[in-house]
Every structure is written in structure tokens, then in C-alpha cells.
Image (cartoon, helix red, strand yellow):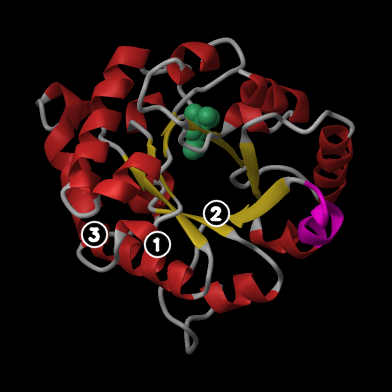
């Protein structure tokens, strides 16, 4: 059976105090059965979060990483630095990074590779905009984004793929389970062409307005193995409830 994973993406939200309160609240909840959980927090809070979660089942991830190992990249964080402090997952290619910070398909691929080389599991985000969906380009866009990553690394080194339709992120318009399932199945078929065994085990997560209310319907689909959760992850109890679903 494929691993189930839920990933919290706090984005640029919270304070040191709210991060501590979230962790304390989450720690009082029972460990989620049959579901791995990862918290992707802002860089500056990661060292403290890693320490506070040591020995707990909640794993820690970053929201981005630089593709270079070191050098004159002012303000950036390398995969080696993340590994150094005990971070084990990293989101790459989130649509907000692609849209606001110029992350191209190729750069996303290099970021995923840099993370994997440092022993960090990359969570590779792919997804189409509303205009692309309306033009019937969903498959083309998803495959183009995925192919860039597969051109530089094997699927075994990808921690998870997250299908995040841009029109569903932070909008309250969750994709209906069948629509998401169709894309997830096509992602798995693409992985199968490279590595059939890994295609069976690779977690493919859905992201975009997931809440405790709509999660079970999504997770009932055969190729939806969990969720990347933005807004609803800001409350520990909501994130936990999504894991229960
Ligand atoms: C995200 O940013 O990855 C995300 C899925 O956000 P939200 O759950 O708020 O739509």
C-alpha cells in the first residue's frame, strides 16, 4: 500500500510565538495512524521547530531552496544548510515561487536535484492556471513541468509530487475529486514510463483549498495519496483533522 502524507505549508505566515503554540497544540493530538505528516515552515523558524519536534512523528520541511551548493547568492539558502539543521523535506516549484520569483521549469528541476543530493526529499509542485485549463492545456503544462524534473533526476529521488491547480490555491475553489484524480493518474502514468516500481510507491498529493470537510472525498480517489495544505494548515487542529481524513 502506498504511503499517505499530509504536508503543511505555512507560507509567510505566523510569528515565533504562534509557531510555538501550533507545535504545542499539535503535540497534544494523537499520532496520526497510517499517515506521515510534514510541517513546512518559514526558514527562520526551522531550527527551533526541528528542535521542538525532535523525537516526534511530525517531520520538518522548507518551502524553497536555492539550486546552487554555495556561493554569491545573497539572501538564499542551500540544501546543505537545510540538511545541516535537520530539515528532511523541501517544497520546490510552488506556483507562488514560479509566479512571483521567476522559478522556471528548469530551475525547479535543479532545486529538486540539489535537495535530493543533500538527502532532502523534494516535494515537486506542478499545476496549471485557470487560463491554461480553459484552453485545454492542463496535461501539456503538467507534463512539461514534470518532464523538466525527470530530465535531471530519477523518480526514486523525488519525495512526492504535488498537483496544485493554481486556480484552486487559496481560493476556496477545491478541484472536484474526479478532476484531480484524472491529473494524478496521468502523473503516475508518466512516472511509470521511467520507473514502474517507483510509480506504484510515489506519493502524489493534491493541493488547493483542502479543508477537513473536503479531504475525505479527495483521499477516496485511487491516485490521491495525501495533501499539501496551505490555509487550513495554519490551525494545528485543522491540519490534524485532514490527516485523520
Ligand atoms: C498551497 O499553497 O500549497 C496551498 C495548497 O494553499 P491552500 O491550501 O491555502 O489552497
Between 15 and 58, which is closer to the camera in this rendering?
58
**Which residue is at 64% across, 26% downward?**
243
Q: How many callouts does the rendering have?
A: 3
**Secondary element type, mark 2:** loop
Q: Which disc number belongs to residue 157?
A: 1
Local crowd at mark 3 within 10 Å, few (<14), some, or many (≥20)? some
Q: Nearer the viewer, mark 1 or mark 2?
A: 1
Residue corresponding to mark 3: 150
* Magenta segment includes 54: yes
- Residue 158 in the image, given as x and y percentages of width and height: 39, 56
The residue range painted magenta reads 48-56
Q: Which disc number belongs to residue 12?
A: none
Q: Is mark 2 within 8 Å of ligand 1?
A: no
Q: Are marks 1 and 2 in contact (CB under 8 Å)?
A: no
Q: CA distance from mark 3 to mark 1?
A: 10 Å
Relative to 39, is 5 above or below?
above
Q: Earlier in the sequence, mark 3 or mark 1?
A: 3
* Magenta segment includes 39: no
Local crowd at mark 2 within 10 Å, few (<14), some, or many (≥20)? many
Amino acid at each position: 500500500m502506498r504511503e499517505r502524507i499530509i504536508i503543511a505549508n505555512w507560507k509567510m505566515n505566523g510569528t515565533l510565538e504562534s509557531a510555538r503554540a501550533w507545535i504545542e497544540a499539535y503535540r497534544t493530538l494523537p499520532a496520526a495512524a497510517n499517515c506521515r505528516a510534514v510541517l513546512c515552515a518559514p526558514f527562520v523558524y526551522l531550527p527551533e521547530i526541528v528542535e521542538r519536534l525532535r523525537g516526534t512523528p511530525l517531520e520538518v520541511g522548507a518551502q524553497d531552496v536555492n539550486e546552487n551548493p554555495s556561493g554569491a547568492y545573497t539572501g538564499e539558502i542551500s540544501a546543505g544548510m537545510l540538511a545541516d539543521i535537520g530539515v528532511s523535506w523541501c517544497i520546490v516549484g510552488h506556483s507562488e515561487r514560479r509566479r512571483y520569483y521567476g522559478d522556471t521549469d528548469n530551475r525547479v528541476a535543479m532545486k529538486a536535484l540539489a535537495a535530493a543530493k543533500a538527502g532532502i526529499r523534494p516535494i515537486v509542485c506542478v499545476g496549471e492556471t485557470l487560463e491554461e485549463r480553459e484552453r485545454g492545456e492542463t496535461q501539456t503544462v503538467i507534463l512539461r513541468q514534470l518532464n523538466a524534473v525527470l530530465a535531471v533526476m530519477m523518480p526514486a529521488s523525488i519525495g512526492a509530487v504535488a498537483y496544485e491547480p493554481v486556480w484552486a490555491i487559496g481560493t476556496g475553489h477545491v478541484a472536484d475529486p474526479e478532476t484531480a484524480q484524472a491529473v494524478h493518474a496521468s502523473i503516475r502514468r508518466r512516472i511509470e514510463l521511467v520507473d514502474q516500481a517507483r510509480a506504484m510507491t510515489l506519493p502524489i498529493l493534491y493541493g488547493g483549498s483542502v479543508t477537513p470537510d473536503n479531504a475525505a472525498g479527495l483521499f477516496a480517489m485511487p491516485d490521491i495519496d495525501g495533501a499539501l495544505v496551505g490555509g487550513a494548515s495554519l490551525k494545528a487542529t485543522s491540519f490534524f483533522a485532514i490527516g485523520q481524513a
